[in-house]
Amino acid sequence: MFYREAGQFKSGYAADQAMFPIPQDRYVVIAIVAFAFLGVPLIANEYWLQAILIPFLVFSMAAIGLNLLTGYAGQLSLGTGGFMAVGGYMTYKFTTFWPELNIVACFLLSGLCAAGVGVLFGIPSLRIKGFYLAVATLAAQFFLVWTFNKVPWFYNYNPSGTVTAPPRTIFGTMFTGPEASAPARYLLALSIVVVFAFAAKNLVRGRVGRSWMAIRDMDIAAEIIGFRPFQTKLLAFAISSFYCGVAGAMSLFLWLGSVETEAYGIDISFQVLFMVIIGGLGSILGSFLGAAFITLMPILLTNAPQFFGFSMASDLQKHIELMIFGGLIIFFLIAEPHGLARLWQIAKEKLRRWPFPY
Amino acid sequence: MEILNAFFVSPFVDMAEYPVFFAEVVANGFLTGIMYSLVALGFVLIFKASETFNFAQGVMVLFAALTLVGLQERGVPTWLAIGITVGVMVLLAMAIEKVMLRPLVNQDPFILFMATIGLTFFLEGFGETLWGSNVKRLDVGIPERPLEVPLGGDFMLLNEFDLWAAGIGAVMVLGLALFFHRTTIGRALRAVADDHQAAMAVGISLRTIWVVVWSVSGVVALVAGIMWGAKSGVQFSLSLIALKALPVLILGGLTSVPGAIVGGLIIGIGEKIGEVYWGPLVGGAIENWFAYVLALIFLLFRPQGLFGERIIERV
């Protein structure tokens, strides 16, 4: 990089323990966040916000959640879609039951519901590990989606079975519902993601995150040095499901506006897992990179043929897209199994020595 | 009280009152279970030899069936088409070994699992690019007449096709057992399954073994594809059977061939009984998750599955 740690002396514990110990890193992060808040709503059009940026934010949130569970605590989960469904449907219930309650409070409450459900489905993790656990969490995925499909109470006995985000305002600005403007929804999603991303970053640096990593690296050894596997694993499930639940609520209220249970299907679980793997296990930055990659890739693939000036039948194009997507995943895993976050780290190390590598 | 009665008493009363219907449900579940087992077998073979959880098994079933139907549609006789498809599956196995497994050797099983999901996407797109995505009928000449089997003074309805499926499944398992226990290459496979490094030390080539194992599970996928395709048409949803095979696998134990069979039967029968007797009480379509919840509860008591190797942890 064009700056380095050398010569940047710390004169206190607070400075040493800062989230971004190098000032330049801190400025870059602040600049990016400021740009996302102030610049993007001015320059991005409706299509960009609705088709790219809002889904990116929703999936980043879900990917951070899964990354806490899989990347930090080492518990493989395929139930992300189910936990997101809990968030979406419970927010809908809360906000239709108490219309005057602030929508963000509804998000948080439904996140807590998702956390409770996550703990329930996390209990088997005490006995089951690895792939067995992954399949066990599929039970959560299928059971939860089925429940929201079959119990009419969850969609307020609506004959079509879809839930639609009702219009809700905060400080007089419409944030959800069909009339809410894309920039408003984008800004609310961005605020939630920024707050929770910083929370996650701090969580994994502290006692909780370290106990998760200890359990991930070797649970027996962690148990011997005094971490309680029961509490640690269940806490990981709870917090991860909280994030996923809020992401599910965001996807209904800020992105899609109206969903059926298919929107939380098994495909979503796999997609989020891909984001976490491609982005990098055990990295908050990786969750963002993975979410960006997986949301942008299909859009790029769809537009690429037009860009190069030849056209194909749409179903053939869809198949070829699938092939390229699958091929790219394999390619990325071979090229860098530790994900984009690791590539970023390598690039940084290379740049540090540039232009005089030894 | 009424709820308790509806859940815990009346289903059993129904079973006792109409034993023939109950037998039909069980037989139906048994045969579905065999079909699940066929898919689960492919998983087990690969997991044993390479500790790879091959998520692409379901899509290999689809791919094999698509290739077979595609060849048939172009006027290739069935026996030749089956032969060519076997060849294609072997080629596929070689390609997978060369492109995907070799560079990823020694990686975390987790990474390999993700790679097989990538393979799933690729094969799905590839198969449908080659052969088109509309639903196709697969007919390999297995009769589909209903049969009436006498049972305690009454008659039970069975489909001849299902009996064929059961028979083919049994032959398949027997063939695999013989292959594993009576041939040199089978012995090498078991050696690799036991201990990779020891197997390499006595001169077994891991690469060859991987190709063989992926080919064999490709052939198993073809058989499963023929059976499922003849039953419900060759279409994209065929690849979703993989999801159904997962609870079968963990119920039986990831490393056990008999486990795949027994697990398949338990899931098949349990699912049908659950759907018929308890499904209407909770709104139906419980087949989607019943198998998983069954497997989940079961795993709580026996984390390695029915016949899986005991999980020993050392620090």
Image: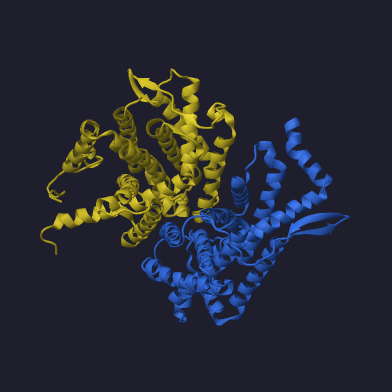
Chain colours: A yellow, B blue
Residue at the right extreme, as displayed: B153
Residue at the front extreme, as displayed: B75
In this rendering, would A281 be left or right of B140? left
In this rendering, would A173 be left or right of B140? left
Task: From the viewer's side, name the closer residue of B123 and B23.
Answer: B123
Task: From the viewer's side, name the closer residue of B178 and B233.
Answer: B233
Q: Residue at x 71, y 48 (%)?
A: B273
State the image coordinates of residue B178 (x, y, percent, origin top left): 63, 76
Task: From the viewer's side, name the closer residue of A297 and B146.
Answer: B146
Can residue A155 be seen? yes
Q: Residue at x 49, y 69 (%)?
A: B214
Can residue A211 be seen? no
State the image coordinates of residue B201 (x, y, percent, origin top left): 45, 79
State the image coordinates of residue B300 (x, y, percent, origin top left): 60, 49
State the image coordinates of residue A43 (x, y, percent, origin top left): 21, 34
Marks counted in the figure total 0
Q: Is residue A252 above or below residue B87?
A: above
Q: Quadrant of residue A22?
A: top left
Q: Residue at x 61, y 62 (%)?
A: B227
Q: Quadrant of residue A57?
A: top left
In this rendering, would B243 be left or right of B147? left
Q: Residue at x 64, y 69 (%)?
A: B173
Quarter of the picture holding the C terminus of chain A: bottom left
Task: From the viewer's side, name the closer residue of A350 and B220.
Answer: B220
Q: Is residue A115 above or below residue B223?
A: above
